[in-house]
Image: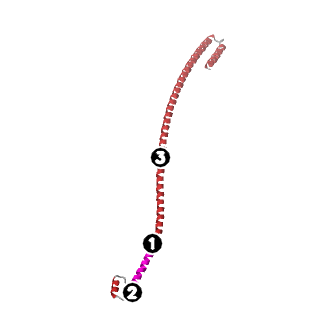
């Protein structure tokens, strides 16, 4: 595009020089020389621009290479960080599994202890029920034996009363015997 501009400017100067060439031959030579100087300068500027563009392209390529190497280096670092995270995750999973096993083991211990307490509680309740039942049976058997004993005591008491009545009758005739019975608290 720069070459096109230079060419257009050269042609326009050349035509302007040709238009005025008839007037002054000398001025035309000067203008022609100026045009050539301008053209040479434009060529040098173009070459300088090409050199600058080439340098910029070279620098851009160098920057691209640096970016590519930085990207590769960052990718390597990210991969190493990913590996570290994966190893940390594996380690944490192992720890969680160990904790889960401990909790499971503690749950088993808890269930065993709870089972032991339930068994003891049921045994105590069963013993209490059995003891009450056997005590009730014993009490029932004791009641019947107590009734028998009371009947025997009543019979003995009745016999005793009869004996006292008889002795009281006998003492009516014998005052010494009455005195002895009175002292023994058989009489009142």
The residue singled out by tag 2 in the image is: 169
Q: CA distance from mark 3 to mark 2?
A: 93 Å
Q: CA distance from mark 1 to mark 3?
A: 60 Å
Q: Residue at x 39, y 83 (%)?
A: 164
The residue singled out by tag 1 in the image is: 146
Q: Is residue 183 left or right of residue 11?
A: left
Range shown magenta: 151-169
Q: Quadrant of residue 155?
A: bottom left
Image quadrant occupied by the N terminus = top right
Say above or below: 126 vs 72.
below
Question: Residue 105: which numbered mark, if any?
Answer: 3
Asked whether 152 falls inside the magenta stretch, the response is yes
Q: Residues within 10 Å of mark 3 (few under 14, many from 20)?
A: few
The picture places residue 84, in percent across and down from the top left corner, at 48, 34
Q: Is residue 8 left or right of residue 72?
A: right
Kindly state the secondary structure of the residue where label 1 is placed.
Answer: helix
Q: Residue at x 62, y 12 (%)?
A: 28
């Amino acid at each position: 595009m720069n070459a096109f501009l230079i060419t257009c400017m050269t042609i326009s100067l050349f035509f302007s020089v040709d238009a005025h060439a008839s007037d002054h031959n000398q001025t035309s030579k000067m203008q022609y020389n100026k045009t050539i100087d301008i053209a040479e300068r434009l060529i040098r500027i173009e070459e300088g621009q090409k050199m600058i563009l080439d340098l910029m392209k070279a620098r851009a390529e160098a920057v691209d290479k640096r970016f590519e190497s930085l990207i590769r280096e960052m990718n390597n670092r990210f991969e190493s960080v990913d590996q570290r995270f994966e190893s940390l995750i594996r380690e944490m999973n192992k720890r969680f599994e160990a904790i889960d096993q401990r909790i499971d083991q503690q749950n088993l211990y808890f269930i065993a202890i709870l089972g032991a307490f339930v068994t003891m509680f049921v045994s105590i309740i069963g013993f209490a029920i059995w003891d009450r039942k056997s005590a009730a049976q014993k009490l029932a058997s004791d009641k019947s034996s107590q009734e028998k004993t009371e009947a025997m005591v009543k019979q003995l008491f009745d016999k005793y009363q009869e004996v006292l009545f008889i002795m009281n009758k006998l003492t009516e005739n014998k005052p010494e015997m009455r005195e002895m019975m009175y002292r023994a608290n058989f009489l009142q």
